[in-house]
């Protein structure tokens, strides 16, 4: 107990959160609006109204008029404001309805994906939150049952994930014709996170890309073999970093410090069904260089989802209003 505040901050956080409830957070930036439509409606239609999902927040990040064209983000906000006017309900249980549990956060210009998530977390009043991308489709209707078993079934699980936990291992790469040392960081397409443990890790979702004076790996880690053994034992050293040339950059991208700190504290990570989601991938980065082809490949998954959307008397018309003509 804190002598001047009666209770300590950890207890205050735990006493004010909703137990076994999840807040969904997903930023949306430059990806085309159809990605946001598919992510949102798969979430609404493939989770029960009275289950673990308590609320969801969409963080619209992208340019303002000083730094680019905000038309895409403006259209997404208009769609979400229209969605907020509807109820959350399913055609198989028409009497079970909720006001749409949606909050829309609009942030501007150079605020990236992890920063947008960090800005939303203070509004989370549930004991867990789900970070997901705006270019995923949830494939399963019963996925929350697996979350109950694997995530809530073990109090030491800090994150449950699909399809894989890491974007990369401990390795090296080239950046601007110079050597880059990379540390394992998390694939944040679909991560169910226990708020209490994430907070106690003392780290941020934000990543760090560091330019340094040239250094040899041995200069920073001392015993290189022990350094390699640490990541090998974690299964994260398939391609060990090079040791012959100096590095000029260090990459600790989104979730790198959360993962490292969680491992140090002996916390667990639980894998959910790897087929739980369909992930388009890089939808905000490769708008003109590949996104159309990747969407084409997943159209059978989209068409199955559209059958459910169009069968809903509220969601069908709203979807038809905003989905681009090429999908009609």
Image (cartoon, rainbow, N blue to C red):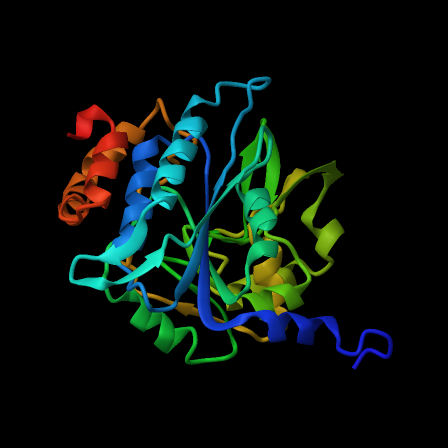
Camera-nearest residue between 159 and 318: 318
Measured along the vertical axis of the image, is residue 221 above or below residue 317?
Answer: below
Measured along the vertical axis of the image, is residue 138 above or below residue 198?
Answer: above
Q: Which quarter of the figure is the C terminus placed in? A: top left
- Which residue is depicted at the point 75% across and 50% down? 219
The answer to whether residue 214 is left or right of residue 79 is right
Give the image location of residue 25, x and y in percent: 47, 51
Measured along the vertical axis of the image, is residue 76 above or below residue 149?
Answer: above
Give the image location of residue 206, x and y in percent: 61, 47
Q: Which quarter of the figure is the N terminus placed in? A: bottom right
> Toward which corner of the image does residue 325 lie, by quadrant?
top left
Q: Is residue 18 visible?
A: yes
- Which residue is depicted at the point 72% across and 70% down? 9
Q: Is residue 323 visible?
A: no
Give the image location of residue 120, x and y in percent: 56, 50
Measured along the vertical axis of the image, is residue 84 above or below residue 156?
Answer: above
- Which residue is depicted at the point 61% across and 46% down? 207
Camera-nearest residue between 298 and 76: 76
Give the image location of residue 285, x and y in percent: 43, 31
The answer to whether residue 22 is left or right of residue 281 is right
Camera-nearest residue between 83 and 75: 83
> Toward which corner of the image does residue 38 lie, by quadrant?
top left
Camera-nearest residue between 197 and 228: 197
The answer to whether residue 234 is left or right of residue 181 is left
């Amino acid at each position: 107990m804190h002598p001047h505040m009666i209770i300590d901050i950890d207890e205050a956080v735990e006493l004010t959160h909703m137990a076994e409830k999840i807040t969904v957070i997903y930023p949306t930036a430059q990806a085309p609006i159809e990605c946001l439509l598919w992510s949102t409606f798969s979430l609404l239609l493939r989770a029960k109204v009275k289950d673990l999902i308590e609320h969801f927040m969409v963080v619209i990040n992208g340019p303002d008029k000083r730094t680019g064209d905000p038309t895409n983000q403006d259209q997404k906000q208009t769609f979400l404001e229209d969605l907020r006017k509807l109820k959350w309900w399913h055609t198989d249980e028409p009497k079970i309805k909720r006001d749409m549990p949606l909050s829309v956060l609009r942030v501007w210009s150079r605020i990236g994906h992890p920063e947008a998530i960090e800005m939303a977390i203070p509004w989370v009043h549930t004991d867990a939150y789900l970070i997901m991308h705006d270019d995923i489709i949830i494939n399963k209707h019963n996925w929350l049952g697996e979350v109950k078993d694997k995530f809530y079934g073990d109090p030491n699980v800090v994150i449950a994930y699909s399809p894989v936990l890491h974007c990369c291992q401990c390795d090296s790469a080239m950046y601007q014709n110079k050597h880059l040392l990379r540390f394992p960081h998390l694939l944040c397409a679909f991560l169910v996170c226990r708020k209490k443990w994430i907070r106690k890790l003392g780290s941020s979702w934000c990543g760090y890309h560091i330019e340094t004076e040239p250094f040899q790996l041995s200069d920073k880690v001392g015993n290189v073999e022990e350094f390699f053994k640490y990541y090998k034992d974690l299964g994260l050293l398939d391609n060990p970093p090079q040791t012959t040339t100096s590095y000029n950059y260090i990459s600790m991208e989104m979730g790198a410090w959360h993962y490292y700190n969680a491992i140090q504290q002996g916390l667990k990570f639980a894998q959910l069904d790897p087929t739980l989601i369909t992930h388009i991938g890089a939808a905000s980065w490769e708008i003109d260089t590949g996104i159309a082809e990747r969407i084409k490949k997943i159209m059978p998954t989209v068409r199955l989802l559209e059958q459910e959307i169009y069968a809903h008397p509220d969601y069908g018309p709203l979807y038809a209003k905003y989905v681009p003509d090429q999908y009609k």
